[in-house]
Amino acid sequence: MATRLKEVDVVLVGFGLTASILAQELTEDRALQVLALERGPWRDTVPDFSTAWIQDELKYAVRKQMFEDPERETLTFRNSMDQRALPMRHLGSFLPAAGVGGAAVHWNGQYWRYQPVDFMLRSHVEQRYGKQFIPADMTIQDWGVTYEQLEPCYDRFEYMLGISGKAGNLQGTVQQGGNPFEGPRRRDFPNPPLKRSYPTVLFDKGARAAGYEPFPCAAANTSRPYKNIYGVQMGECTYCGYCEWFGCGNYSKASPQTTILPALRRKSNFECRTHCNVTRVNLDSTGRRATGVMYVDAQGREFEQPAQLVILCAYAQHNVRLMLLSGIGKPYDPVANTGVVGRNYAYQIMSSVDVFFKEIINPFMGAGALGQGINEFNTGNFDHGPHGFIGGGYIALWTTGGRPILQHYLPEGTPKWGAGWKKALAENYLKASSIQCHGSVMSYRSNYLDLDPTWKDAYGNPLLRLTFDYQKNEHAMSDFLTDKAVSIAKAMDLRSYHAKQRKGHYSIVPYQTTHNTGGAAMGSDPSNSAVNPYLQSWDVSNVFVMGSSVFPQNGGYNPTGTVGALAYWAVDAIRNRYLKSPGPLMQA
C-alpha cells in the first residue's frame, strides 16, 4: 500500500533543464514549497564530471553510462501501423538521460532560436503556397504563440546559459558576421563567438565561394569567464573535445549544474528526491484536477505525493506516456483521427558530406558547438514552390573533438574492417571532418505515440509505442539540403568528399539526434492540441507540460533554445496569472 506524504505546492516530474528553470523561478516566492522528483541519481560538476574520469569515451559514449537503461525503461517501435512493435533493447537513434540535469548534461550546446515563420507554419504555407501545397495526411499547425511573444524569453534563456555567438539581426537591422536570417533580437549574445578551428575556416571560405553567408554558430560553451543572471560563475571553454555525451568538468558548458543548481540549492523551499520513478499523476473524481503523483523509490516502495500543481518536466516521450497512463487528455486515434495525446510526433532527418582535407586539421581540438554554418535553406528563407516540399534545415561544419573510438571519417570505398580499414583510418584521422545537414520533419497522421497493448514495464504499466517513418516530403527536403552541402564541399579545395544521403525507412538502431518532439502538441484549439499556448493541459488545469513534447512539428534547428524559451514563457504565466487565480489560463 502506498505511503501518503505531506502535500507540497508544486511537484516537478523530472529534474533536468526545464525543471531547474521552473524550480529557480517558482521558489522566488518563498511561500511556495517546490519538490522535484528525479528517476536517476544526483550528479554535480564535482565530483561526477571531474576531467580525471569523465573524459572516458568507452564508458560514456560507447557504453552509455549516463543514459537511460533500456533494460529497465524502454519503448516499443514500428515504422507503420501494419507492423508489430518490438521493444528497443539497446539505445540507438536517441539517448534519453537519467539523472539530475537530464539531457542538458550530455548535450553539445548547439543553440538556435526558431524563426518567426516556424511558429506560424501552417498559416505561412497556406498563405504563400496555398492550402493544396500541404499533403492531406500532414498535420502541421500553428503553435498558438509567436516569435515576438517568445523573444524576451529567448533573451533571458541565453543570458542564463551564457551563450557565445554573434547577433545577425538586432532589432530588425541585419548585422555583418552573424546569422542574417534569424528573427530580430533585442541585444547581442552575452559572450562573443568561440575561437575558430581550422576546419571551420575552410568551410567558411568554401561557403562564401559557393555564394552563401556563413556565420559562427551560437554555442552554450562559454568563450570567456561569465557570471549569469542567477549570479553563477562559469569558466572559459578549454576546447577539450568532450562535450557530446559527457558532463563538463570545466564549468563552461551550460547545464543545470553550471548555471542554476548552485543558486537553487541554497533555497530552503526547494527539495529534490532522486531515484524516484513517477508512475502516474493522480486525478480527483471529476478527472479535471490533479491531486498529486504516485512514485516508486529505489527500494520498490510506493508513495503518494500530494501537490497543488503538477508540472511534467521529463523527456518528451516520457511526458506523453505519463499523460496517457494518467488519463490526462484524450488519447490520439490515427484511424478515427480523433484525440490529441500522442498526436503530432516528429523527429529530425540528418545527412552529411564527409570532407577530406589536403593538410592536417587537428580534429581533437574542439567544443560541442564550435561550428560555422549557413541558414539560407531553413523553412522560411527560400522559395519552396519549385521544389514541392515543406521545411528545411541548416548546414554546418562542427568541430566537436576527434574522439578516437567513434569519431572517424573514411573515404568512400574503404573496407569495413581489417588492414585496409586500419590503413585508411590512420591516413585520414588528422585530415577529415564532416558537413552536417540538420533537417526538419513535419507531423503526419500516421506518426504518433500510444500505449503498447502487449509489452509492459516492471510495474505492470504498458510501454510507450512509437510509430514513425520518414515521408516523401522529408526525403525530398533532405536530398535538397545534401546537394547544397555538396556544393560547399566542391568549393573547399579538398582531396575528396563523400556525400551520405538519408535513404529508406527510419531506423531506431543508429544514433542520429535526441531531438524527439510532439505527442503533447501546444496550440489555441483543443481539438488538435493537448496543451494551450501556456503549456497548460486543456483538460486538467493544474497540470503543465514542458519540453519538446509540446512542439506541433519539428523545425530545422536543435530544439533546446525553444524548449528553454517556452519554459520561461510558461513559468511567467504560472507565477503572474495561474497562482493568483488557479484555473484555465485560456478558454477552449
Image: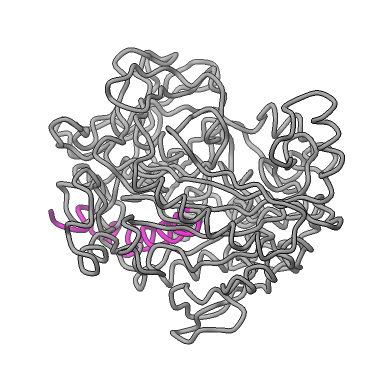
Question: Is residue 560 within the magenta segment?
Answer: yes
Residue occupying image coordinates x 40% and y 29%: 5
Q: Quadrant of the N terminus?
A: top left
Colour mapping: one colour
Is residue 507 shown left or right of residue 42? left
Q: Nearer the viewer, residue 264 or 560?
A: 560
User: In the displayed structure, would residue 125 be above or below residue 7?
Assistant: below
- Residue 409 percent across, percent down from the top left: 73, 42
Q: Nearer the viewer, residue 266 or 223?
A: 223
- Residue 166 percent across, percent down from the top left: 61, 75
Is residue 542 shown left or right of residue 29? left
Residue occupying image coordinates x 41% and y 45%: 475
User: In the displayed structure, would residue 113 be above or below residue 545?
Assistant: below
Residue occupying image coordinates x 47% and y 73%: 181
Residue occupying image coordinates x 54% and y 42%: 513
Which secondary structure is most common in the magenta stretch? helix
**Residue 385: quadrant of the picture:** bottom left
Is residue 47 shown left or right of residue 380? right
Question: Is residue 476 within the magenta segment?
Answer: no
| Circle count | 0
- Residue 180 percent across, percent down from the top left: 51, 77
Span highlighted in magenta in the image: 559-588
Is residue 538 shown left or right of residue 485? left
